Image (spheres, grey):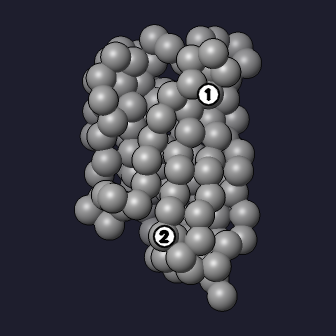
Amino acid sequence: VQLQASGGGLVQPGGSLRLSCAASAFTLEHYAIGWFRQAPGKEREGVACIGSSAGPTYWPDSVKGRFTISRDKAKNTVYLQMNSLKPEDTAVYYCASVIGSLCPFELSEYHNWGQGTEVTVSS
């Protein structure tokens, strides 16, 4: 069972994108859903997470105030709204899940990793 991330693309610096994370085989409502990214040559890092009943968590200081994670229970989808994009946001973005309301920092706690969606910020 995998989550499906979509919505990536090529955008100019300062632009916006909204990524979607959807699941067809299970209900996301009872899971914390995290967004992660991996830039070329770098390790995968956490970006944001929303617990099943808790508020959002953002990890890199660089995305705070620019990225917003949200959940649409009716659509069984979690979104990552990315504004004021910078070239350093270029990466493949993944979503993954962990049962429960909390968002662990360790990536190894997460499951159901999908294939990711590529985001390129360039002029």
- Local packing at callout 2 (Cα closer than 10 Å; few below 14, some 14-19, many 20+) is some
Callout 1 secondary element: strand
Question: CA gap, disc 1 to disc 2?
Answer: 23 Å
Name the quarter where the N terminus is drawn. top right
- Hey, which quadrant is residue 26 in on the image? top right
Residue in the picture at 46% in, 11% down: 30
Name the quarter where the C terminus is drawn. bottom right
When the figure is inspected, residue 15 is found, relative to residue 80, above or below; the finding is below
Whole-percent x, y for residue 49 in the image: 39, 37
Residue nearest the viewer, comparing 19 with 102 = 19
Q: Give the left or right position of residue 72, taking residue 44 as reference.
A: right
Callout 2 secondary element: loop
Residue in the picture at 30% in, 29% down: 55
Q: Give the left or right position of residue 50, taking residue 60 as reference.
A: right
Whole-percent x, y for residue 16 in the image: 59, 64
Q: Nearest to the eye among marks 1 and 2: give it.
A: 2
Q: Give the left or right position of residue 33, taking residue 2 as reference.
A: left
When the figure is inspected, residue 90 is found, relative to residue 118, above or below; the finding is below
- Local packing at callout 1 (Cα closer than 10 Å; few below 14, some 14-19, many 20+) is many
Residue nearest the viewer, comparing 6 with 11 = 11
Q: Which amino acid is tagged 1?
A: Thr
Residue in the picture at 57% in, 53% down: 93
When the figure is inspected, residue 39 is found, relative to residue 60, above or below; the finding is below
Give the residue number, with chain letter if any, for mark 1. Answer: 77
Observer able to see residue 102: yes
When the figure is inspected, residue 34 is found, relative to residue 65, above or below; the finding is above
Whole-percent x, y for residue 63 in the image: 36, 61
Point out which mark residue 84 bears.
2
Badge 1 vs badge 2, beta-carbon distance below 8 Å: no
Whole-percent x, y for residue 92 in the image: 60, 59
Observer able to see residue 114: no
Residue in the picture at 71% in, 45% down: 6
